[in-house]
Image (cartoon, helix red, strand yellow):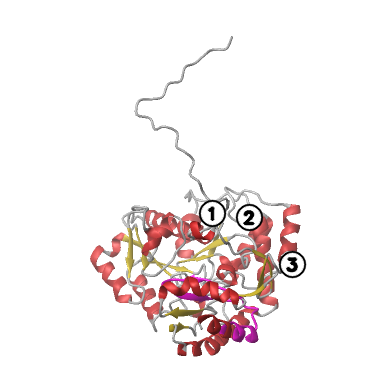
Amino acid sequence: MGRQTTVRRAVGMMAPMTSPQLPDYPLWHGFADMGAVSASPFVVARGEGAYVFDAEGTRYLDSTAGLWFTNVGHGRTEIADAVARQLSTLAHCSGFGDLTSDVTLALAERLTAIAPVPGSKIFFTSGGSDSIDSAAKLARRYWHEMGRPDKKIIVGRTKAYHGMHVAGTALSGLPPNREGYGELMADAATVDWDDAKSLLGLIERVGADNIAAFFCEPIIGAGGIYLPPEGYLAEVRQICRDNDVLFVADEVVTGFGRIGGGEWFASTRFDLQPDMMTTAKGLTSGYVPMGALFVAPTVAEPFFSGGVWWRHGYTYGGHAGAAAAAMANLDIVERENLLDEAARVERDLATYFSPLIEHPAVHEIRTGLGAVTAVQLADAPAAMAAVGALRKQGVSGRAAGAGALQISPSFVMTTEQIEEMAAAIGRALD
């Protein structure tokens, strides 16, 4: 006969909790009030070019290219076919130790060739938040290898968004994104987003010997699309050089043409020569999750000289299927001259959105630099309602920052479609 046991409730142990009555909706969305969203989700069923379609077949201009990422437009079967071929050949292998796949290596070679800093090394991640955390860890580890282990502080800016992993949340300049978590990461600091002297002041207060890296979006993205003041990027870059602080360009949003003015990266457009550059989104146009951290030779040198391990990596870093998607995506960008088209989108947005400043509901239009625009509403809390009104006008949109409508279309959106989108926003605000 099997051994019998007696289980007693420990003194003070909580009684089983009664299961709460929740909505039947099963999916938990990111950045959402699920009490409201679960009652009426906006379900997208397919995409084609600059449009998305809901489950009933209603067509909407996609004003945000998904979430900044569908640079080549929706429905590109060429990318899907490339992924299918790769998955049927080799889905993935580990990227740890001496292992890699042929397509992953080919993609790294291709990215090195277009890097803002010649000879950069490519470390693959699963997305933008991974890229940010990787850069934060590598910055600290680099200074450790250089015999300066006290350089630990990582610096972000107000209004900035750097993903939602631990380091990215600690770097965030958006207070609501940090609320309720406590101190996630020691040695993180924030300076004013638009004043280079604020960075210099921090360096003078805490000492350059304690600061590892400064993280900088060339254009503030999710924080509301704020363009850098004239000369700001060059000034903070020089401050970092003068004080031995690594300059990390966060190009998760801006990379692969969105802010390039005909170049691949904002870092090239503004000659930033970053020590590290974080990317994702436009790398695959969102068809498969993937990110890449570009590391300049000076930072990579201690780890490529032999004998030093960087004990960091991701199971799906450099995923072969994602690498195939990236290769096909880059093929499309080059073949269809989409970097030039992105520059055309930049001009079109300025042309057709600037007049919206005359609308009484609009406080500011931020445009003219990159394939992005912000329509800042005078009544910031009305932005979410405006998104709903936009859908009734045939435009799928999104609120960003403090009451702005995010405009970041695909590079294949035509001039006529941009004009139509601006007019639809005017009608929605009416």
| Structural distance between the alpha carbons of marks 3 and 2 | 19 Å
Q: Please state which of residues 196 and 349 is positioned toward the viewer in this rendering.
A: 349
* Up/down of 394 relative to 165, above or below: below
- Left or right: 363 in relation to 387: left
For the N terminus, give its image quadrant: top right
Where is residue 255? Give x, y as percent: 54, 71
Where is residue 126? Give x, y as percent: 56, 57
Q: Please state which of residues 313 and 30 is positioned toward the viewer in this rendering.
A: 30
| Marking on residue 28 | 1
Which residue in the protein does label 2 denote?
Answer: 319
SS class, disc 2: loop
* Up/down of 214 relative to 235, above or below: above
Residue type, numbered disc 1: Trp
Question: Which image quadrant is residue 274 in?
Answer: bottom left
Mark 2 or 1, closer to the camera: 1
| Marking on residue 77 | 3
Q: Which residues are magenta?
A: 395-422
